[in-house]
Amino acid sequence: MKKMQFSEVVNRFGMSVTMILLGLILLIVPDSASVIIAYLLAGILTLSGIVFAIGAFLDQSFSKGFWALACLSIGGTLIGNPLLLARNLGRFLGVFLAIEGGSCLRRGSRVFGTVILVAAVALVLSPMALSRLVFSLCGLAVLFIGIGMLADRLRSQKKLDRGDDNIIDAL
């Protein structure tokens, strides 16, 4: 059995351990992912606003000035309140689902329309629930993928340690 160097351990097990940790973080604190996405979007909008402002100043263009103002105001608002994005997207989806549920009821699909309307009311009354649910489910998926990768790496490591002749050691 050969002793593995630290870099070999990191190469072999680093990704799976990172995915397990990321999955646990998403499961335990799902709002942190919403905040990170909101900050990234806010940074992109703010930088776009600055570029539009420079372009509006150089070209003396009203439309670029308008887009600069819009990007800077939305970016600044998201920097000040990052959970506003998840909350408003949840409400928007709730309103959209309410319209779709009403349409299903009008077409005669009572059960499906009722289920959609109940989901719509839940989203409008508690818009952060969707964000938490989505990121918790993503965290669960990432956690299971990381566990599967780790189990696969450990199984292949045991075969390499035993000196199995059918395994080609390419690392």
Image (cartoon, rainbow, N blue to C red):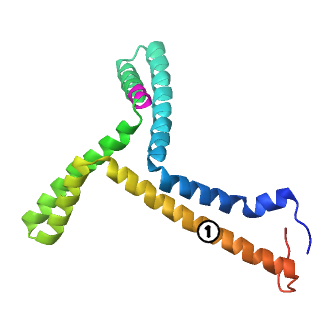
- What residue do we see at 47% from left, 19% from top? 55
On whether residue 44 falls in the magenta region, the answer is no
SS assignment at label 1:
helix
Q: Going by the image, does 99 lie left or right of 135?
A: left
Q: Quadrant of the C terminus?
A: bottom right
- What residue do we see at 37% from left, 24% from top? 73
Q: Is residue 109 among what the camera can see? A: no
Question: Mark 1: which amino acid?
Answer: Ile
Name the foreground residue: 48 vs 17.
Answer: 17
- Residue 118 sits in quarter: bottom left
Label 1: few (<14), some (14–19) or many (≥20) C-alpha neighbours in 10 Å: some
On whether residue 78 falls in the magenta region, the answer is yes
Give the percent coordinates (x, y) of residue 149: 65, 69
Give the percent coordinates (x, y) of residue 25: 54, 52
When the figure is inspected, residue 4 is found, relative to residue 95, above or below; the finding is: below
Name the foreground residue: 55 vs 115.
Answer: 115
When the figure is inspected, residue 37 is found, relative to residue 159, above or below; the finding is: above
Secondary structure mostly taken by the magenta-highlighted segment of the chain: helix
Name the foreground residue: 67 vs 153.
Answer: 153
Give the percent coordinates (x, y) of residue 140: 49, 63
Magenta residues?
Answer: 76-80
- Residue 78 sits in quarter: top left
Task: Give the labeled residue for mark 1.
Answer: 147
Q: Going by the image, does 108 lie left or right of 11?
A: left
Q: Is residue 89 among what the camera can see? A: yes
Q: Going by the image, does 16 lie left or right of 165?
A: left
Q: Quadrant of the N terminus?
A: bottom right
Residue lying farthest to the front in this orientation: 28
Q: Going by the image, does 156 lie left or right of 85?
A: right
